[in-house]
Image (cartoon, rainbow, N blue to C red):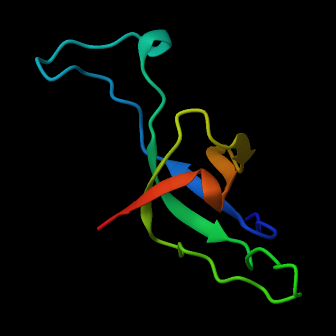
Amino acid sequence: MLKPLGDRVLVKPDAAEQKTASGLYIASNAQEKPQRGEIIAVGAGKVADNGERLPMDVKVGDVVIYGKFGGNEVKVDGETYLLMRADDIYAVVE
């Protein structure tokens, strides 16, 4: 598994919607990228100007909402993840 550095997090995106609310199937090239996923790993946090490490706002297991184009896609053991900065995360789903 990957260990993110600094203020980066590794997110497992939710599966893209394959059906509309009315039950119609969506072609794979027309499916929207999900903007929700689960935190799989977190870095140690950003280092402030005074040398202190700032705590992360998210933890492993959190379900989060992130920007539509946030993060970089990476593949690990055949699974697709997003590696992004914590600033790209908008909210934690409670």
Q: Is residue 80 above or below residue 54?
A: above
Residue projecting furthest to the front: 50
Observer-nearest residue: 65 or 47?
A: 47
Observer-nearest residue: 87 or 78?
A: 87
Identify which residue is drawn at 15% across, 23% down.
21
Identify which residue is drawn at 45% across, 40% down.
35
Q: Is residue 94 above or below residue 81?
A: below
User: In the rendering, at what x and y percent does residue 76 appear?
Assistant: 72, 50
12 lies left or right of 44: left
Choose top left, top right, bottom left or bottom right for residue 93. Answer: bottom left
Q: Quadrant of the N terminus?
A: bottom right
Identify which residue is drawn at 57% across, 65% down.
40
Observer-nearest residue: 58 or 15?
A: 58
Q: Is residue 8 above or below residue 82?
A: below
59 lies left or right of 56: left
Q: Quadrant of the C terminus?
A: bottom left
Q: Is residue 29 above or below residue 15?
A: above
User: In the rendering, at what x and y percent does residue 58 appear?
Assistant: 53, 72
Identify which residue is drawn at 74% across, 79% down.
44
34 lies left or right of 12: left
**Could you tell me how many numbered marks the image carries?**
0
User: In the rendering, at what x and y percent does residue 83 appear?
Assistant: 70, 51
Choose top left, top right, bottom left or bottom right for residue 89. Answer: bottom right
